[in-house]
Amino acid sequence: MKKLTLTLLLLFVTLLGFGQNHNHAFGRKINFPNVEGYVTLKADLHIHTVFSDGSVWPDIRVQEAIRDGLDVISLTEHLEYQPHSADIPHPNRNRSYELAVRLARNSNLMIVRGSEITRSMPPGHSNAIFIEDANPMLKEEAMEAFQEAKNQNAFVFWNHPTWTGQEKDGIAKLYDLHRDLISKGLLHGIEVVNMDTYSEEALKIALDNNLTIMGTSDVHGLIDWDYETQHGGHRPITLVFSKERSIESLQEGLTAGRTVVWYNNLLVGKEENMNLLLDASLKVEKVEYPGNTSIAHVTIKNLSDTEFELRNLTDFSFYDMADLVKIKPQSETVIKVKTKDILSDFDLEFEVMNAVIAPKAHAKLTLHVARTDN
Amino acid sequence: MKKLTLTLLLLFVTLLGFGQNHNHAFGRKINFPNVEGYVTLKADLHIHTVFSDGSVWPDIRVQEAIRDGLDVISLTEHLEYQPHSADIPHPNRNRSYELAVRLARNSNLMIVRGSEITRSMPPGHSNAIFIEDANPMLKEEAMEAFQEAKNQNAFVFWNHPTWTGQEKDGIAKLYDLHRDLISKGLLHGIEVVNMDTYSEEALKIALDNNLTIMGTSDVHGLIDWDYETQHGGHRPITLVFSKERSIESLQEGLTAGRTVVWYNNLLVGKEENMNLLLDASLKVEKVEYPGNTSIAHVTIKNLSDTEFELRNLTDFSFYDMADLVKIKPQSETVIKVKTKDILSDFDLEFEVMNAVIAPKAHAKLTLHVARTDN
Amino acid sequence: MKKLTLTLLLLFVTLLGFGQNHNHAFGRKINFPNVEGYVTLKADLHIHTVFSDGSVWPDIRVQEAIRDGLDVISLTEHLEYQPHSADIPHPNRNRSYELAVRLARNSNLMIVRGSEITRSMPPGHSNAIFIEDANPMLKEEAMEAFQEAKNQNAFVFWNHPTWTGQEKDGIAKLYDLHRDLISKGLLHGIEVVNMDTYSEEALKIALDNNLTIMGTSDVHGLIDWDYETQHGGHRPITLVFSKERSIESLQEGLTAGRTVVWYNNLLVGKEENMNLLLDASLKVEKVEYPGNTSIAHVTIKNLSDTEFELRNLTDFSFYDMADLVKIKPQSETVIKVKTKDILSDFDLEFEVMNAVIAPKAHAKLTLHVARTDN
Amino acid sequence: MKKLTLTLLLLFVTLLGFGQNHNHAFGRKINFPNVEGYVTLKADLHIHTVFSDGSVWPDIRVQEAIRDGLDVISLTEHLEYQPHSADIPHPNRNRSYELAVRLARNSNLMIVRGSEITRSMPPGHSNAIFIEDANPMLKEEAMEAFQEAKNQNAFVFWNHPTWTGQEKDGIAKLYDLHRDLISKGLLHGIEVVNMDTYSEEALKIALDNNLTIMGTSDVHGLIDWDYETQHGGHRPITLVFSKERSIESLQEGLTAGRTVVWYNNLLVGKEENMNLLLDASLKVEKVEYPGNTSIAHVTIKNLSDTEFELRNLTDFSFYDMADLVKIKPQSETVIKVKTKDILSDFDLEFEVMNAVIAPKAHAKLTLHVARTDN
């Protein structure tokens, strides 16, 4: 009787007291390691505010980015689409950038000037970032806007080529106009991830045309609501491998195509970039044969915020798992490898199921394992 | 472009009751029961948007209110303080109201037209709500604005009299000007709770001058961030006991002073209103003497979202608690009363520690308890 | 004295379904659907109490099983290993079974009489269940014990062939003695999962020799501690596809080899049994082409407690996922399939990454999808 | 066989501090500070195992105590009540103690030898602890058992005087026999808290007769289940203020009556002991007048695992709270005191609502507050 009361009470307490999120190692802030030779910059380069069709003032965008632990954002207001113009008739297309720079002054957050060239398909929407002045970008002809972007030395990427507002089948298609833009050096990247979409066809276009692989939130409302951050969700971001932590290096890294996109638990990137990230994220910490056994206990540390899902490609079997191994974010996992004999060193080979390097193709990972207990 | 779709989607999701927050019994939505003779309207009547010094467009305010399960809000932009005027030069002080009305059209949320008369102390800041047109409220002299509010048949309440920006000691003080406003029928209420402050002195002013007790969020940023809704927090609200669910009844209820403020776990109100709420919130569900004992098991149901903290004022002792009893929100609690003999009925008397009816004074609650097991 | 009251109370609470763990759909209770033609019985058939080398009285085992929502357990005390004999000198090897039967009387939990034949390798340890009397099983020679089990019409399975206490390399090996047992019909199953181990080699032995695939907790301490049930963990169980919910049907199902083992998120079973479980667990609920698009929204319901990890084997791409799809337990997931044209029906084909049917081989799943919106 | 390994593993894990419960500051381990002049020992001195009517072997009791961070336990088996005697016919009433001592050898947990004298009321049940040999305690006459306890220099306390199995009204009553025991120095303490009960009348008996105030779990099943430790619950414990961390000092502290009981969120103790604990638990960390205000920000650190509920007894009002202040366990809380003028120092006085020092009487706490920002 009392037990029942207690149980009921505690049950309700629990239901009422739920909701804390322990999914990220340091609260909500996103963490990925630097990679060999580069700083890993966490970027969201497609964002809106009230200065085009978003619902918040730039201060909220700055605070969201700081809460998310981002290094850099760009407020890429639509040049041509200004639904708030009855209330915000500002002719200055740089305004949200200028406000954000001031608002981020006392933080480490970098703000990149950008604008969204908003056209019907083709070419659809594109973001020009690292521009010097958004106002002259507002042109009659799409091609002129791209040309102006080039004049300003911009990095330009194609937004949501998969958007059903412009492609009813949700399939990204490369039009002649795009081929033209690419050949003229007017288009440098493509969103493979936008908001809550992933496009295999956009990935193929990126690989076939050597475009930089991009992922962005394209947020209009609140990051917290769109991505349920309180339940461990996160916005899509682009990890850019940069020589330094600066806007110049960011542009160099983007232009050189050194990106990996993080979307839900998925990583998307070109093979060489993915390999850089995998090597930096998964470290063999310890290799021991405990007790009197010939079972190698291999401790692997995951320094990233994503959970890795590895499929065993060797002939070895594991002592407590089948061939699918999960490596939790920001923690250590022990893989118990039945090596039959005690080996001084050996290789573990995995298919990284959550790391996509081409349509339906996953990265491979080889971990060289050497005993640390003798 | 995607914004409208997004907004509609969010509205739809919210209306469908897909609460994403499990902190309250029914998600994040706030629940208090109707009281004897009245509908309990959940109101936040002091809110800002980008149309004065807030950080969001009115759509976010509408969505926040729907997520919180409120019945009514007022977007009370500062008449005189317009820090965004360089970007939003709108001369129409009704604009955020008009947008909100349109955005809330497909929901049950009611929007009240209001404005904040923003002056130095005295009289400090005041909200005039239920006005017909905000624009003529913008006057040179404060007194003229209050007079215009009266002409428009407004309900006017004094905002944050405790604000350290105007009172360095944080103590609400009634100035001659306030006495004048009150005697002329130009001031009808006072915020005892504003944002994250509670003022015992404001409560005394309310009681001494028969002003309506108000509690508001005065939100400028995001409700989710200011009140950590993901951890079970909530904005301060005013419960208004109204004859019907309508704006007219709301005004009648406010004018008649029928309010209780909910702030953190605290309830603040005049004794008669508090008693209405306590009677509606705490119900004796079941009274049994189980087994062969003379210990009455009294099941009390809490129909509200606040946790009640009751102090036993009778000579009875309890079988598993000392004199302090907690009644969890939206659940049942069994109090085991050692009545020595088996009684057919008896009274439980409590001091309600979290229900303030005057400075440092708590409501009393008597529950008449009659056996239900024979 | 208070123990009985306590036990009854806990039973009552548990039967009322007030689970304390919110990780599964119905609290801590494990749920898997019945499969075509069979009832799915959730069994843990390898358990210890103080009557051999366990740490709890049988009442705790009964309560743990009820909390876990199991259909059937067996308390398989070691016949030969009795470390508590100084305190519990009971010569009756049936004692924990007899106590458990009485303790489970008012619940739905079935208790199977069983004993662990505890020998050095070969043959190692084996459980004989469905026996009539454990006492005569205690023989000098291992083979005699197996023979006695057969005389009693037992189902016998080989325990933890992978245990490093008997195999230093953790690799299950079939000895001549095992071949002999199998050929004589004295050994019918093998643990592929025991406690926190999984054995690929045991799976191969099972398949090569047509032994029943078993998974058990082999618990000695507390289920809650060993499997962190409060964090959503669960003990390994064997799902047995039985004609009815009875001990006789359970034995028939085991003898016929109709089992799938659930261990962490992994399912292990023979292909035909796995297919039965997959078909019963994953249901196409709805297929719609929303808006004006040619993207099929396929709603898949997972009726099981395991999270399925599916790899897309078709040429279709998905609108918001790459080729790896996760189907959360006891919930619905929408897969957005880009079919280019609007199709009246089509097939989705998946590799089920968490369903192992042979060493390093996964089950395949074909879902036939037909439009429901026209 | 695997049990020892398992036990060692669990011990190891626990000693390493891998708490699995995040409700307390340091996992599930209970923390209270030492008090002025004394070490605070966390004790549960009323516990059962299979050696009387409990459901677990002593190893589980040792592990539970280590998980809970206790300093000392006593396995107080019923002398006269042996429901497991058909299976555990052991005539040695010291057996569970002896096993526990061995099992706790590699931990810091202290084990006290004890026995429960199990009689009808009066005198009801009593625990004799610090005895030398439980076997001679088994006497025909209750009084002889108490006399034997005295001969062995035991500390004896009256168990659950409120138990409805012996008092139908749940009210502790002092019988002549108890008065006799007390006057003869045969009874030294009384349980005010047992399992899930609190007795105001037992508290009065303790105070009137100078008996030591005791609180125990009297656990028969599992601590995790009875107290829902995974949801932040804890067993009742007695905090004993001892000169050293030793069994001898524990006995001296108990004999001298230096105890406070912790039960749910309630503390129960004699005024002088409660004051020691309050002084050690609540520390003024910082006192500042920020900005240009005359509002003192007083930072109070709670070094204990209980949440304090303080009622303001001064004329001061607070800037963001009414008169009820909650001080969360193991954390800092800022109280914003409106002192009108800037004061160099002042006193805060509180009624500690959750600290009971007599029936319906709470401890008082005075915190002297001196500015730290000048």
Image (cartoon, coloured by chain):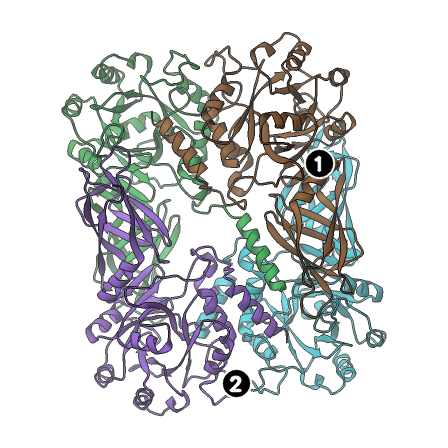
Chain colours: A green, B brown, C purple, D cyan
Query: Above or below — where is B114 with respect to A140?
Result: below
Percent x, y for residue C65?
Answer: 45, 69
Q: Alpha carbon of mark 1 to alpha carbon of mark 2: how far?
A: 67 Å
Percent x, y for residue D66?
Answer: 56, 65
User: From the viewer's perspective, is B220 left or right of C112?
Assistant: right
Q: Residue at x 68, y 20 (%)?
A: B166
User: From the viewer's perspective, is A58 left or right of B318?
Assistant: left
Q: Residue at x 44, y 32 (%)?
A: A64
- Examine the image and state in which quarter residue C358 appears: bottom left
The secondary element bearing badge 1 is classed as helix
Tell which of A126 and D344 is nearer to you: A126
Q: Is residue A284 visible?
A: no
Query: Above or below — where is A127 with respect to D352?
Result: above
Query: Above or below — where is C66 with respect to A308?
Result: below
- Examine the image and state in which quarter residue A232 appears: top left
Quarter of the image where the C terminus of chain D is located: top right
Residue C88: assigned label: 2
Tell which of A135 and A66 is nearer to you: A135
Q: Depth-wise, is mark 1 or mark 2 nearer the camera?
A: 1
Q: Hey, what amino acid is under mark 2? A: Ile
The secondary element bearing badge 2 is classed as loop
Q: Chain of mark 1?
A: B
Quarter of the image where the N terminus of chain D is located: bottom left
Q: Is residue C304 visible?
A: yes
Q: Chain of mark 2?
A: C
Tell which of B222 and D256 is nearer to you: B222
Residue B273: assigned label: 1
Percent x, y for residue A348?
Answer: 25, 56
